[in-house]
Structure formats: C-alpha cells, structure tokens
C-alpha cells in the first residue's frame, strides 16, 4: 500500500487548531500511544522520539469532531510517512488503533488504544523529548520531518518453528514462519487486555 493513499485522504477537510485537553494530559496520552507504536511497529529510538512529537501535536489540536480526521490528522499521516519505513507504515495503516487513534462520541474524545491495551503499562522508557517538547512541529505546508534522516530497524528476522506431525506415510515436519520472536509474542499476550471498566479513556471537551 502506498503512502500517498493516506496522505491524500480527506485533503479538503479544514480544521481549527485548539487545545483539546490539558497539556499534561495530552503528553501522558501521547506517551502511552507512542509506546505501543514503538512496540508493535519496532521503532528505533530516533523514530520513537519523532512519533511521540507527532502524536502530541495531533492530540493538542483535536477539539471537536471535525478535527478528528481533519487537517491535523492529515498532517500526522504525512509526518509519519517521513519517519516510518514502508513496512512500518503499511503495518500502521492496518492498525486501526494507531491509524485512527481518536473517535468522537457524545461530545467526548475517545482514545482507541485503550480498546487494545490496559492503562498504565509501558514497554519502553520515556523518549528524550518527553520533557522538552511542547508541540509545534505540525507545519501545514512542509513536513518538519522531511529534512531529517531516521535510523530504521533491521529487516525482520525469520524464526522457524518445526513441529513433528504424524502422517500416514511417517513423520513430516511442519514449518511455521514468523517475523517476531516467540518470546516477544508471549510478552505481548501477557500485556494486552481489555479492562471492563476502563476500555476507553474519555475526555470531555474543555476538561
């Protein structure tokens, strides 16, 4: 899937920038979202910092339903296309909780990531820019990240798991190929979850 398909989506939408939630709240939510993107998309440190900045800028500029998939969302996709590799960006597009991180319900912002992860657990440390960055890299005309070079992860390692199965003509191995180490999948399953009382984080407008 080409990056241009997403970047061109909804180009006619116009949004008014405004602070949707207190900065400290936006910062914590951007950290939680970026941490999960770092884990699932296998981000390098430089990518992780840039993704945090991009997510924070987006959260700070969503204040109404029109903003959710408006100009700030288009800019977010454009900026991420400069930071992520093609493989990472394709995986990002397939992940609804990353690609559309916010929905608007009953005049509230709903963060989709909490339908996939319980609140609180972080896989990585805070990015270096967590303290210093306060927003402002979501330039409308030219991407701030277009002029930067980011370290990209190495191609995924292929792990072969051979399982002997008994057939009518003897034993024949079955090969299961995964681009993720089995221990990583075990760690993911242990930390993923649906909290019945906290499936989504809601933020009322103006709170």
Image (spheres, helix red, strand yellow):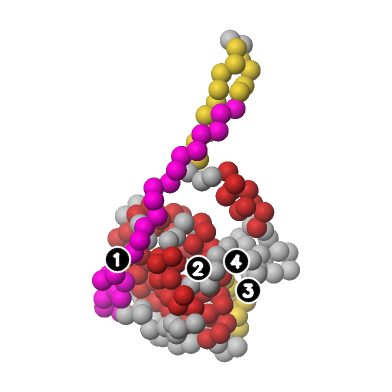
Q: Position of residue 50 (x, y in %)?
A: 40, 71
Please rate how many residues cluster around mark 4, counting C-alpha atoms within 10 Å: few if below 14, some from 14 to 19, many from 20. some
Q: On the picture, is 181 further left or further right than 66?
A: right
What residue would you read off at disc 3? 201
Residue at disc 4, secondary structure: loop
Residue 159 against residue 63 in the figure, above or below: above
| Alpha carbon separation for disc pair 4 and 2 | 10 Å
Query: Range of the magenta residues?
Result: 140-163
What residue would you read off at disc 1? 149
Residue 11 visible in the displayed image: no
* Residue positioned 62% across, 62% down in the render: 117
Asked whether the residues under the numbered discs 4 and 2 touch, taking CB atoms below 8 Å apart as contact, a structural biologist would say no
Q: Based on the picture, tell me whether residue 152 belongs to the magenta stretch.
A: yes
Going from the N terminus, do you reach mark 2 or mark 1 first? 2
Going from the N terminus, do you reach mark 4 or mark 2 first? 2
Residue 17 against residue 197 in the figure, above or below: below
Please rate how many residues cluster around mark 3, counting C-alpha atoms within 10 Å: few if below 14, some from 14 to 19, many from 20. some
Going from the N terminus, do you reach mark 3 or mark 2 first? 2
What quarter of the picture does the C terminus occupy? Answer: bottom right
What residue would you read off at disc 4? 122
Magenta region, main secondary structure: loop
| Alpha carbon separation for disc pair 1 and 3 | 34 Å
What residue would you read off at disc 2? 34
Number of numbered discs present?
Answer: 4
Please rate how many residues cluster around mark 2, counting C-alpha atoms within 10 Å: few if below 14, some from 14 to 19, many from 20. many
Residue 26 visible in the displayed image: yes
């Amino acid at each position: 899937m080409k990056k241009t398909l997403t970047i061109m989506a909804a180009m006619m939408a116009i949004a008014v920038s405004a602070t949707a939630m207190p900065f400290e709240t936006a910062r914590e939510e951007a950290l939680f979202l970026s941490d999960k993107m770092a884990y699932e998309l296998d981000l390098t440190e430089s990518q992780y910092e840039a993704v945090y900045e991009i997510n924070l800028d987006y959260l700070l500029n969503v204040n109404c339903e029109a903003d959710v998939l408006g100009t700030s969302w288009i800019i977010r996709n454009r900026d991420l296309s400069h930071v992520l590799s093609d493989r990472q960006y394709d995986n990002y597009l397939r992940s609804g909780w990353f690609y559309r991180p916010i929905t608007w319900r009953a005049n509230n912002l709903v963060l989709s990531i909490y339908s996939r992860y319980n609140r609180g657990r972080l896989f990585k440390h805070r990015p270096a820019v967590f303290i210093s960055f306060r927003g402002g890299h979501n330039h409308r005309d030219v991407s701030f990240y277009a002029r930067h070079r980011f370290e990209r992860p190495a191609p995924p390692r292929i792990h072969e798991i051979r399982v002997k199965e008994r057939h009518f003509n003897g034993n024949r191995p079955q090969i299961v190929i995964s681009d993720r180490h089995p221990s990583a999948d075990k760690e993911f399953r242990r930390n993923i979850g649906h909290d019945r009382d906290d499936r989504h984080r809601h933020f009322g407008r103006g709170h």
